[in-house]
Image (tube, rainbow, N blue to C red):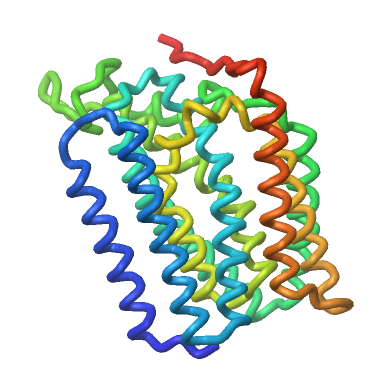
């Protein structure tokens, strides 16, 4: 797949432009309503699907199918991120009107980190083709671990990066609007929102270790890996505000995601034995997510049980 430099430049310009529009649209501190979140989610999903249509038209059905498979994998795994974000915001007692700013810069950092990781992964695959088998085994083990730990939740207070940051960086316990830093007593100190951003970026690195190899399982083309990741991540903020209050109902989501990771892991290991068509990969991904979501909503329809989230510790 020959992707000229101008195409890369155009895609990056589009991403930067959409981020600028999003930042401008949310420059005023306010609580994002369900209606607003739904509208932005529709915009981001439409943008991702439209870009996939362009890839399909320009590079053929195979490339288009690989893009959509990567997009669906990243989008599905990003739903699990939403619960982690809810845990972080609850732990730090972040006012809802400040959450978008933390997520915006978190996603911006995620895009940069994903670009670095994807470039590194592509370079490794270019020199050592056997790395695919390492990725495959890693994804299977990750899927099994995710299934076994499906009822467990992280505790932000145990995060070593957060502990180190709190120890090394002078801070204030009070929020100062949507600012990450304020000047107090003649020195700059970090607000709690800065530590929220650190945790979000830390967790995204962990998620990237899972999701990027998973996308490499359906395509090894760096352009498709990056764009499917980017357009899936761009809608993560609006998806959070749309689904955060419903995450307690997705009790089988991790089981579905675990099945996807195991599937793509085996797909990598069997690459030299049998080539699984991209259409079948798409069908498996959609089926796993659909079954997990429908089963979750049916199971929690009557109870409406809400999970307890760890609160901030003073």
Visible residue check, residue 170: no
- Determine whether 199 is above or below 214 in the image: above
What x and y, as percent, mark residue 257? 69, 46
Q: Residue at x 27, y 25 (%)?
A: 191
- Determine whether 277 is above or below 290 in the image: below
What x and y, as percent, mark residue 31? 27, 28
Quarter of the picture holding the N terminus: bottom right
Quarter of the image where one finds residue 38: top left
Task: Tell which residue pokes out farthest to the left in this image.
Answer: 186
Q: Residue at x 43, y 71 (%)?
A: 51
Looking at the image, residue 59 sits to the left or right of residue 183; the answer is right
Quarter of the picture holding the C terminus: top left
Out of 83 and 202, give the one closest to the viewer: 83
- Determine whether 48 is above or below 129 in the image: above
Looking at the image, residue 10 sits to the left or right of residue 45; the answer is left
Looking at the image, residue 14 sits to the left or right of residue 139; the answer is left
- Determine whether 250 is above or below 275 in the image: above
Out of 58 and 219, give the one closest to the viewer: 58
How many numbered dots are placed on residues in this image?
0
Quarter of the image where one finds residue 286: bottom right
Task: Tell which residue pokes out farthest to the right in this image.
Answer: 273
Visible residue check, residue 191: yes
Q: Residue at x 49, y 75 (%)?
A: 223
What x and y, as percent, mark residue 60? 56, 86
Looking at the image, residue 167 sits to the left or right of residue 71; the answer is left
What x and y, as percent, mark residue 54? 44, 78
């Amino acid at each position: 797949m020959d992707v000229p430099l101008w195409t890369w430049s155009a895609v990056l310009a589009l991403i930067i432009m959409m981020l600028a529009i999003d930042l401008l649209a949310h420059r005023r501190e306010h609580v994002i309503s369900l209606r607003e979140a739904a509208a932005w989610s529709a915009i981001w999903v439409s943008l991702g699907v439209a870009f996939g249509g362009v890839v399909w038209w320009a590079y053929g059905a195979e490339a288009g199918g690989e893009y959509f498979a990567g997009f669906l994998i990243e989008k599905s795994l990003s739903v699990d991120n939403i619960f982690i974000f809810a845990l972080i915001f609850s732990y730090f007692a972040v006012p809802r009107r400040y959450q978008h700013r933390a997520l915006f810069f978190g996603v911006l950092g995620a895009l940069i980190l994903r670009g670095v990781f994807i470039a590194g992964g592509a370079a490794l695959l270019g020199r050592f083709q056997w790395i695919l088998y390492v990725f495959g085994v890693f994804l299977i083990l990750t899927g099994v671990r995710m299934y076994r730990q499906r009822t467990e939740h992280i505790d932000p207070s145990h995060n070593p990066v957060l502990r180190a940051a709190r120890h090394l960086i002078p801070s204030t316990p009070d929020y100062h609007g949507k600012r990450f830093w304020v000047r107090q007593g003649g020195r700059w100190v970090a607000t709690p929102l800065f530590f929220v951003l650190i945790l979000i970026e830390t967790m995204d690195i962990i998620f990237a270790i899972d999701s990027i190899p998973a996308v490499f399982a359906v395509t090894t083309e760096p352009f498709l890996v990056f764009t499917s990741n980017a357009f899936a991540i761009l809608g993560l903020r609006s998806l959070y505000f749309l689904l955060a209050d419903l995450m307690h109902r997705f009790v089988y989501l991790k089981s579905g995601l675990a099945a996807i990771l195991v599937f793509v892991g085996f797909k990598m290991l069997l690459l030299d034995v049998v080539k699984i068509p991209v259409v079948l990969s798409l069908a498996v991904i959609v089926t796993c997510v659909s079954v997990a979501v429908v089963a979750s909503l049916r199971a929690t329809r009557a109870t409406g049980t809400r999970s307890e989230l760890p609160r901030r510790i003073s």
